[in-house]
Image (tube, grey):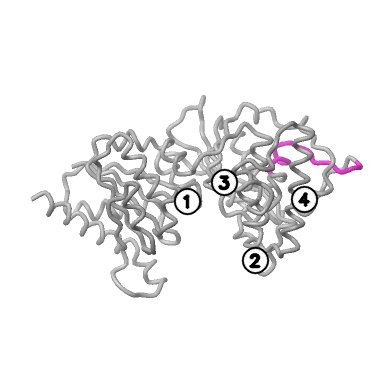
Amino acid sequence: MKFVIAPDSFKGCMTAKQAGEAIRAGLLRVFPDAEYVMVPMADGGEGTVRSLVDATQGHMRSAKVLNPLQFETTAEYGILGNTGDEDKTAVIEMAAASGIQFVIESTRNPLVTTTYGTGQLMMHALDDGARTIILGVGGSATNDGGAGMAEALGVRFLDAHGDPIPRGGGFLDRLVTVDVSGVDPRIARTRILIASDVTNPLVGPTGASAVFGPQKGATPQMVTQLDNNLAHYAAVIKDQLGIDVAHTPGAGGAGGLGAGLLAFTQSMMRAGVDIVSSTVRLVERAEGADYCFTGEGGIDFQTKFGKTPMGVAKAVRERNPHIGVVAFAGHVGEGIDQLYDVGVDAVFGIVPGAMPLNEAIADGPRNLIRAAENVGRLIRLGRR
């Protein structure tokens, strides 16, 4: 028997690697002689850096950067272990530098937050020799169109007097000139993969400000101001650089960071789980496997929209259409029957009964071991 174990993290409970080890521990009680292939997974959101570093035997790095409110903080990023110096790959979660967790809920104000720290992380990755950067863009506190990020790379955003405009989406209406003459030349030689499932444009009723601004603290008046400012920003970029980012699908991700990346770097956008699957060679490693086990903290009707269990099922069945795919979750919500039509054979909740959330989290590894053992027993029963 060959088992591929490819879970995402269980948020607040287990990293993807820890979840995989728990699944293996349970299955080992039933199949001690099976072959186990461990592939920690992610979908571009929280946990992506750790999962990719663990899956490739890479290493973590840390750097001093500015958080969204421009206070110094220490942020981590990863260098993958399955690439050489000629194709060294770094992986960054923009939330590590520019995430919503840095801003107290009662004082959130996306007019003033900046992605400058994300750009600083990218520069640190270049200093480490990265030729490719995988950038996860979820969980942002920002709505600046990626202008802060671009400034850290060397772009200058100038007002009518030739002075730099302040950082933050609330000041983009002052933008008159975009000066790219000082951009670090390594940027043009660096491939950037934007790990995002967001398809929203930069502006308009489904744009960055209207859809994501309120959760970052934007009032209705702020949403209007931010959307107008981003529209002006996009118009200046189009006029001076010939690049139209206003209505590009995905440009609105992370408060418009997608737009800034598309305008100022050599970047392309892909579903996060597809980038991770390709990077860790999930398809190749699943060849000849009998079962694949995946999972994450919660599985429901949203899982089919690019979440890890869905992406894993799709990937492993690319060359192995008869592989069994089993998913575990801390919480199983409504709509999981939709997953059965797209490659997931069964979904199992791991919580044995009603209990407080803190207990469920504390007991998560033990519960996952138990659930995996019981699924293993079912598999063995079917082989009699």
Q: Nearer the viewer, mark 2 or mark 4?
A: 4
Neighbor class of circle 2 (other Cα within 10 Å; few <14, some 14-19, many 20+) is few
- Left or right position of 82 against 247: left
Which kind of residue does numbered mark 2 sit on? Ile
In the rendered view, tell whether residue 149 sits above or below residue 83.
below
Q: Distance between the residues labelled 2 and 4?
A: 24 Å
Q: Which residue does the numbered mark 4 point to in the structure image? A: 229
Name the N-terminal-most of marks 3 and 1. 1
Q: Is disc 2 placed on a helix, strand or loop?
A: loop
Q: Nearer the viewer, mark 3 or mark 2?
A: 3
Neighbor class of circle 1 (other Cα within 10 Å; few <14, some 14-19, many 20+) is many
Q: Which residue does the numbered mark 2 point to in the structure image? A: 104
Q: Which mark is residue 107?
A: none
Q: How far apart are marks 1 and 4 (CA)?
A: 32 Å
Q: Quadrant of the N terminus?
A: top left
Q: Which residue does the numbered mark 1 point to in the structure image? A: 47
- Magenta span contains residue 127: no
Q: Is disc 3 placed on a helix, strand or loop?
A: loop
In the image, residue 39 lies at what x, y percent? 35, 43
